[in-house]
Image (cartoon, rainbow, N blue to C red):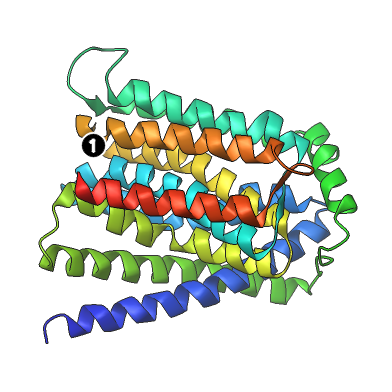
Amino acid sequence: MTALLPLFLLIVGFVALILGANWLVNGATSVGVRAKMSPLIIGLTIVAFGTSLPEMIINVFSCIKGSPGLAIGNIIGSNTMNILLILGVSSMIFPIDVSKVSIRRDIPAGFVATFAITLMANDFFRGTSATINWVEGLVLLAMGAGYLWLTFKKKSKHSEDLELSKDSDNSETPQEMPWGKTIFQLIIGIAGLYIGGELVSKNAQILALSWGMSESTVGLTVVATATSLPELITSIVAALKKNSSIAIGNVLGSNILNIFMVLGVSSLITPLPFDMRMNHQLMILFCANAIMLATVFTGKGRKISRFEGSLLTLGYVAFMLFSLYN
């Protein structure tokens, strides 16, 4: 009986996530049309910020409450899920086109971000305890600011990423809504994602701990999965609407912001301890980035096909089994 309330709240959280994701995609698309932004830029910025809120909130709350050990595991697990499961499921629904600018800028930025936290977590620069401290957090935030500056450069906004939108014959035309409705859907969408992410994360953790899972395992698997649900649902909604640029932009942008911004802010609150056993998961995250890049150049065009999406999804199942086994 004691598990019934957390289970009920978990279901409520799922509903809030689904509704919030749908509203956020609609509102963000309308803003992008008005601002003459490409769907890729919308996904990389507005949508990615909104769907990264659960990771940010969970990490901040965990650090304040004295459980910073969840922070790094949450981000590693979330980013791995974003690439393998979310891109996999989204491309199974509708093949994802990848623009040249994503190949040149966003995918390499994901590699750089992953490499940066690998060095910092293993104290390559200081050679002391395995933590990410506030100085390294400031470096991550500065790198994040640099990435956002590159993203909003006029040349990137109006070149290859717009080329992708024009050449996609199957995609739906983004709709412009009245300003009042646009702002309302953005606010309600982000609120739904926040509330849903909080409910799902908190109650999933309660259920997992009641089933005897360790805190580090909870951070890497249950909490990471729960906080990535907004990205999953947002990308699925975008894929169903054939907005593949928002789907991949959401994943790439969220992964980069998770490392640069979420871990950066978290480490300003308290040093983030790193379990050296999670180096295996970091290596898997590197491999996931490499596999994602490889899928772009295999097959016809710069696309992640349905078949490649199924392989990515199976890769995530293997990752979860490996993490739980360890």
Q: Name the image quarter holding residue 121.
A: top left
Q: Name the image quarter holding residue 225.
A: bottom left
Q: Is residue 192 visible?
A: yes
Spot occupied by residue 42 in the image (x, y as percentages of width and height): 69, 52
| Relative horizontal placement of residue 81, taking residue 135 as reference (left or right) | right
Please report the residue visible at 52 percent of the width from the left and 47 percent of the height from the top.
Answer: 254
**Looking at the picture, does residue 48 appear above or below residue 182?**
above
Q: Tag 1: Cα neighbours inside 10 Å, few (<14), some, or many (≥20)?
A: some
**Looking at the picture, does residue 59 appear above or below residue 2?**
above
| Relative horizontal placement of residue 42, taking residue 14 as reference (left or right) | right
Please report the residue visible at 68 percent of the width from the left and 55 percent of the height from the top.
Answer: 246
Q: Secondary structure at mark 1?
A: loop
Spot occupied by residue 305 in the image (x, y as percentages of width and height): 68, 52
Spot occupied by residue 177 in the image (x, y as percentages of width and height): 78, 73
Circle 1: residue type: Thr
**Looking at the picture, does residue 230 appear above or below residue 152?**
below
